[in-house]
Image: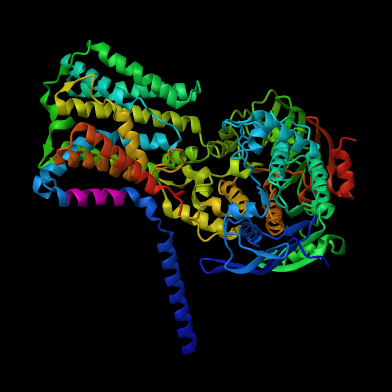
């Protein structure tokens, strides 16, 4: 066996006396793509922060090509050719691709002025190497998210990176962009660059990774070759206890007679939503499937009053209503759990409690004052019932994991007791454990008589919770399927692709 | 079993001590930098200027009188800055309001008339600011920068830069010159406005929604917060309080004058930021603002007693403000 490029041995780290990493070993070979998996709080990000010098380990050693190194800050990491591509990109949107790549390392001419030309030429070479179709002079803000990632990768390459860490690289990419990214990953492998790939998306990991390491509760559970382990086993390792058939669909009983709680007729909005009609009954979970750009998210925005409605009608409990802004939508009993929880769902610097009570401030007043005790009670109750992992209700939301943040967005709306819940990508960027919990919450809500609309690009998830699925393509509903009639993911996949 | 009980007791104790330690750890002294700095400034002047009468009641009450207008405008500005906006027009509004109130009193509209006209002046300008910012969607910095010039021009134009004396003694007593017992009425007004402001920001739905608007406008909108309405209201409040400060200048000086409140907008913003309100919105504290204002006032006062001339005062004041904010930064490198 050859000597690994990187080996981390016996890494331990504690915060405030709580051990978040417990003698973890991790190794990476030259040209390998190594998946790092685990639930929230498993220790993935802490381990990577130790590798990139954001934190220093309490115990343990790091070897690169057999030589012991100490990484105490991000500069040390750079010196050892380690780079990380963050979930939230670290690019300046107003600068060009080339300016971003060489930010702080700008090529200069003999009298110390910037040499734009050289900068652009070097960038062009890098982009050519990656076979990315972008000009060095393109301004970042004008490019799609997929290209931002390519720019990040090019930036890492320009620093002669040997170890590249990618944290949820595909979470904001379309399917096509993901394919391009995978091509690039293959090219990087051929160049001998090693990649640590952090993701919750199993199918991707099995598609491009060589080995998988699973962490749970700060301990390494296993490292296996990808072709020697099944997805089911990986899930079990991540969750720990036997995964209680989270993705299994159970037929639910509800009535589709009588008045639908929400009926949308020939809805049109902007250029993306052309003609959408559907009915949603109390106690029903209606799945909405469709590709990125099919108009499914725009449809939600129109129903919730964020984008103006250009045509069609919306009936709630049989009564026609005009929805001009989110306040109107909330007043008729609709709640939206938006796609981008950090931008649209939460006020990150505020506490768990403050976020949860925001939509119900008017209901917890005593005179003109807020009833603080009631507010605390409500927040405490939701933290308990939704199993939100936080020290207390006064903790800043920013410090919580994705899954727990999503539960807070849910709690926020449940506190308002809506009749219709619209969830746009409810489990995006959430680990498998929290995903299971969120799907259970959705089922329970429907059981209690609420009508739920779930929009998701993860078919597995849609198939697990939906009673019916409508497929949106080109701004129109092209198909409606009863869950009972869908016997495999392929059937749905075909419908979504528009044939 | 007794031994088990004891163990359990110990455990509970341990847990308590842990949570206490944690609570203590959770307190970040940087959140309280303005209070620490304020106490530091008082102690410093008390020691060095003791013989010059810094610590006398009359001098301390004087500081309260001098800072009242900044504090009161600061309370309203805390709301504006908490939504992530800014209001540069407050200084000019105090000047115009002092003049309109004085003219109304001169015209014989009586005490209530004078007060209503003064406050109304601030209110109307606040409404115009609010509408331009929320309906026409012009950044508040530009709207209020423009308004600062317009209002100042109006204040100069309305009486051709001549001051308007106020002889209404009840007005002068209530709005600036009076004392209740030995307590200056300006201190009473400051306390009243501070308490009201604090309660609105921390205890009402409006306050919570103000902070939410500044914290993440999009998320707040998605949650059903009428962010435009909130923004409109904070500018109306800011205009109204600037009008009120104009009345206080007028009552204290027994006149309306276009030079009142000159440069106040910057002192007010400094007090708000010094107090711990985030310039980017989402975090705000009314009490902090008032302490910030008192601190600036105390520094002014102490430097004057020390015998520093105006140029030196300005330099020292600027340095102290920058230092205080620098120490309060969370991003300060260790």
Q: How many marks?
A: 0
**Is A301 in front, or is A143?**
A143
Q: For the N terminus of chain A, which image quadrant?
A: bottom right
Is B138 situated above or below B231?
Answer: above
Q: Is residue A450 left or right of residue A480?
A: left
Q: Nearer the viewer, residue B61 or A161?
A: A161
- Residue found 11% across the figure and 21% down from its top: B167
Q: Quadrant of the C terminus of chain A?
A: top right
> Front-most of B42 and A11?
A11
Is B167 left or right of A74, judged from the image as shown? left
Please indicate, yes or no, whether residue A290 appears anywhere in the rendered image.
no
Task: Determine the residue located farthest toward the front in the rendered image.
Answer: A110
- Whole-percent x, y for residue A429 in the image: 69, 50
Q: Which SS type dominates the magenta stretch?
A: helix
- Looking at the rendering, the stretch of residues picked out in magenta corresponds to B35-46
Q: Magenta includes B44?
A: yes
Nearer to me, A358 or A19: A19
Task: Report which quarter residue A400 is drawn in.
Answer: bottom right
Residue A376 visible, this angle: yes
Q: Residue at x 21, y 49 (%)?
A: B42
The spot of residue A437 in percent (x, y) is 68, 57
Residue appearing at x 72%, y 36% in the figure:
A147
Q: Is residue B35 left or right of residue B178?
A: right
On the image, the x and y values in percent for residue B154 come to: 30, 14
Q: Is residue B136 magenta?
A: no
Q: Position of residue B289 (x, y in %)?
A: 32, 41
């Amino acid at each position: 066996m050859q000597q690994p490029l990187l080996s981390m041995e016996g890494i331990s780290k504690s915060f405030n006396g709580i051990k978040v990493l417990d003698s973890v070993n991790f190794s990476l070979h030259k040209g390998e793509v190594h998946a790092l998996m685990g639930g929230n709080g498993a220790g993935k990000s802490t381990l990577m922060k130790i590798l990139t010098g954001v934190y220093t380990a309490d115990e343990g050693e790091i070897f690169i090509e057999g030589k012991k190194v100490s990484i105490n800050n991000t500069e040390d990491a750079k010196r050892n050719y380690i780079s990380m591509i963050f979930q939230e990109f670290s690019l300046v949107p107003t600068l060009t691709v080339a300016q971003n790549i060489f930010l702080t390392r700008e090529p200069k001419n003999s009298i110390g002025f910037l040499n734009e030309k050289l900068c652009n030429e070097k960038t062009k070479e890098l982009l050519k190497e990656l076979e990315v179709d972008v000009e060095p002079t393109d301004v970042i803000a004008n490019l799609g998210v997929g290209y931002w990632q390519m720019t990040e990768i090019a930036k890492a390459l320009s620093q002669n990176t040997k170890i590249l860490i990618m944290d949820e690289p595909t979470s904001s990419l379309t399917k096509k962009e993901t394919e391009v990214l995978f091509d690039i990953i293959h090219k990087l492998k051929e160049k001998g660059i090693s990649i640590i790939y952090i993701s919750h998306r199993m199918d991707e990991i099995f598609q491009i990774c060589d080995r998988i390491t699973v962490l749970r509760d700060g301990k390494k559970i296993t490292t296996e070759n990808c072709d020697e382990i099944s997805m089911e086993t990986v899930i079990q390792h991540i969750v720990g206890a036997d995964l209680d058939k989270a993705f299994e669909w159970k037929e639910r009983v509800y009535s589709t007679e009588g008045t639908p709680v929400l009926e949308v007729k020939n809805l049109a909005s902007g250029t993306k939503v052309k003609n959408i009609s559907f009915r949603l009954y109390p106690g029903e979970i209606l799945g909405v499937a469709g590709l990125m750009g099919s108009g499914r998210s725009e449809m939600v925005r129109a129903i919730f009053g964020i984008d103006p409605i250009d045509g069609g009608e919306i009936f709630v409990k049989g009564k026609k209503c005009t929805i001009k802004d989110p306040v109107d939508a909330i007043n008729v009993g609709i709640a939206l759990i938006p796609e981008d929880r950090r931008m649209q769902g939460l006020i990150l610097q505020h506490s768990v409690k403050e976020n949860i009570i925001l939509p119900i401030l008017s209901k917890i007043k005593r005179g003109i004052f807020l009833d603080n005790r009631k507010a605390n009670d409500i927040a405490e109750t939701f933290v308990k019932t939704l199993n939100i992992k936080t020290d207390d209700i006064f903790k800043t939301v920013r410090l919580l994991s994705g899954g727990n943040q999503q539960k807070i967005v849910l709690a926020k709306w449940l506190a308002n007791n809506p009749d219709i819940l619209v969830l746009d990508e409810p489990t995006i960027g959430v680990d498998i454990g929290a995903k299971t919990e969120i799907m259970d919450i959705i089922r329970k809500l429907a059981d209690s008589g609420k009508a739920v609309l779930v929009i998701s690009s993860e078919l597995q998830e849609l198939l697990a919770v939906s009673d019916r699925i409508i497929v949106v393509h080109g701004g129109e509903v092209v198909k409606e399927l009863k869950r009972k009639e869908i016997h495999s993911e392929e059937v749905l996949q075909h419908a979504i692709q528009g044939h | 079993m007794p031994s088990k009980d004891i163990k359990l007791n110990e455990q509970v104790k341990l847990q308590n001590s842990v949570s206490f330690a944690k609570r203590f750890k959770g307190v970040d002294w940087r959140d309280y930098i303005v209070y620490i700095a304020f106490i530091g400034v008082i102690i410093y002047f008390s020691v060095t200027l003791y013989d010059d009468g810094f610590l006398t009641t009359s001098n301390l009450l004087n500081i309260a009188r001098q800072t009242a207008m900044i504090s009161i405008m600061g309370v309203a500005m805390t709301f504006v800055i908490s939504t992530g906006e800014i209001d540069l027009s407050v200084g000019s509004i105090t000047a115009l309001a002092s003049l309109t109130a004085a003219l109304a009193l001169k015209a014989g509209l009586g005490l209530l008339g004078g007060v209503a006209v003064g406050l109304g002046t601030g209110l109307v300008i606040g409404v115009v600011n609010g509408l331009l910012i929320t309906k026409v969607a012009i950044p508040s910095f530009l709207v209020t920068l423009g308004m600062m010039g317009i209002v100042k021009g109006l204040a100069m134009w309305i009486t051709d830069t001549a001051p308007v004396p106020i002889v209404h003694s009840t007005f002068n007593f209530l709005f600036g010159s009076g004392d209740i017992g030995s307590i200056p009425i300006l201190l009473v007004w400051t306390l009243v406005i501070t308490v009201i402001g604090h309660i609105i920001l921390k205890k009402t739905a409006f306050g919570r929604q103000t902070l939410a608007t500044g914290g993440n406008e999009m998320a707040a909108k998605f949650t059903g917060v009428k962010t435009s309405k909130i923004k409109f209201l904070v500018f109306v409040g800011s205009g109204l309080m600037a009008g009120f400060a104009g009345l206080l200048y007028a009552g204290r000086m027994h006149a309306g004058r276009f030079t009142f409140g000159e440069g106040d907008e910057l002192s007010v913003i400094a007090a708000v930021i010094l107090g711990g309100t985030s310039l980017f919105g989402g975090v705000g504290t009314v009490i902090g603002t008032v302490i910030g204002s008192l601190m600036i006032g105390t520094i002014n006062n102490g430097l004057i007693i020390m015998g520093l001339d105006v140029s030196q005062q300005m330099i020292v004041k600027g340095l102290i403000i920058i230092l205080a904010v620098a120490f309060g930064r969370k991003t300060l490198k260790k």
